[in-house]
Image (cartoon, grey):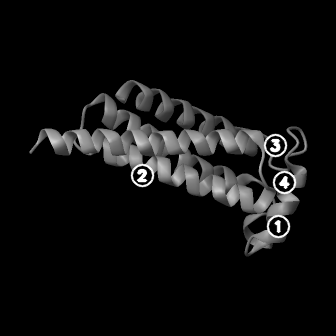
């Protein structure tokens, strides 16, 4: 499972960096179709005048929660660190929670649904590997 986990952690991490950069380049969302999404965030999230005047804060949160964490997990996987599978599990859970928040704000859509599956696959793969290690240590 680690090849799949390595791929997913890097793929999701790179996607998060790309999404964050996109939000910083055009914080209004006009050029990439995000303007209606910003309005939905303003309507549903707390402190809209503080955090959702534009996408800059969202870009930082995306980078932190789904970019850096995924890259840390990928690094731990490549180093075969004992906590690597736990990091992948946490990343999968974070990604699924992120998508649940997206569903609540914007509703279901193909990209969000796909990324939820990516998070689920990460979490399941990590649990399978952790169980295999536990069984092997008996």
Q: Check disc 4 and report the residue beneath it.
A: 37
Secondary structure state at the residue bearing disc 1: helix
- Residue at 72% in and 66% down: 51
Quarter of the image containing the N terminus?
Answer: top left
Question: Would residue 19 be visible to someone looking at this image?
Answer: yes
- The residue drawn where x is 46% and y is 48% is 91
Q: Position of residue 36 (x, y in %)?
A: 90, 53
Q: Earlier in the sequence, mark 4 or mark 2?
A: 4
User: What whole-number distance in Å separates the C-alpha atoms at marks 4 and 2?
Assistant: 27 Å
State the separation of the CA atoms marked 2 and 3: 30 Å
Q: Which of the numbered marks, if any, corresponds to residue 42?
A: 1
Q: Earlier in the sequence, mark 3 or mark 4?
A: 3
Q: CA distance from mark 3 to mark 4?
A: 13 Å
**Residue 26: which disc?**
3
Residue name at image x 44 percent, y 46 percent: 123
Front: mark 2 or 3: 2
Asked if marks 4 and 1 touch (Cβ < 8 Å), the reply is: no
Q: Secondary structure at mark 3?
A: loop
Dot 4 or dot 1, earlier in sequence: 4
**N-terminal of the two: label 1 or label 2?**
1
* Picture quadrant where residue 101 is located: bottom right
Marks 2 & 3, CB-CB < 8 Å contact: no
* Spatial CA span between label 1 and label 2: 28 Å
Give x and y (percent) for residue 37: 84, 54
Question: Left of 116 or right of it: where is 127?
Answer: left
Q: Residue 65, how many percent across, how many down?
A: 53, 52
Residue 26 or 72: which is nearer the viewer? 72
The image quadrant that residue 126 belongs to is: top left
Report how far apart the C-alphas of labels 1 and 3 lie in the structure.
17 Å
Q: Nearer the viewer, mark 1 or mark 3?
A: 1
Q: Residue at x 88, y 42 (%)?
A: 33
Residue under label 2:
90
């Amino acid at each position: 499972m680690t090849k799949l986990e390595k791929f997913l952690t890097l793929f999701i991490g790179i996607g998060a960096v790309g999404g964050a950069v996109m939000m910083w380049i055009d914080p209004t969302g006009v050029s990439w179709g995000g303007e209606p999404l910003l309005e939905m965030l303003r309507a549903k999230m707390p402190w809209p005048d503080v955090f959702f005047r534009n996408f800059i804060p969202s870009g930082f949160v995306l980078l932190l929660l789904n970019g850096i964490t995924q890259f840390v997990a990928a690094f731990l996987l490549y180093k075969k660190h004992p906590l690597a599978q736990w990091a992948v599990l946490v990343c999968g859970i974070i990604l699924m929670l992120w998508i649940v928040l997206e569903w609540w704000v914007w509703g279901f859509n193909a990209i969000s649904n796909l990324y939820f599956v990516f998070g689920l696959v990460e979490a399941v793969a990590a649990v399978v590997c952790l169980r295999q290690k536990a069984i092997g240590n008996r």
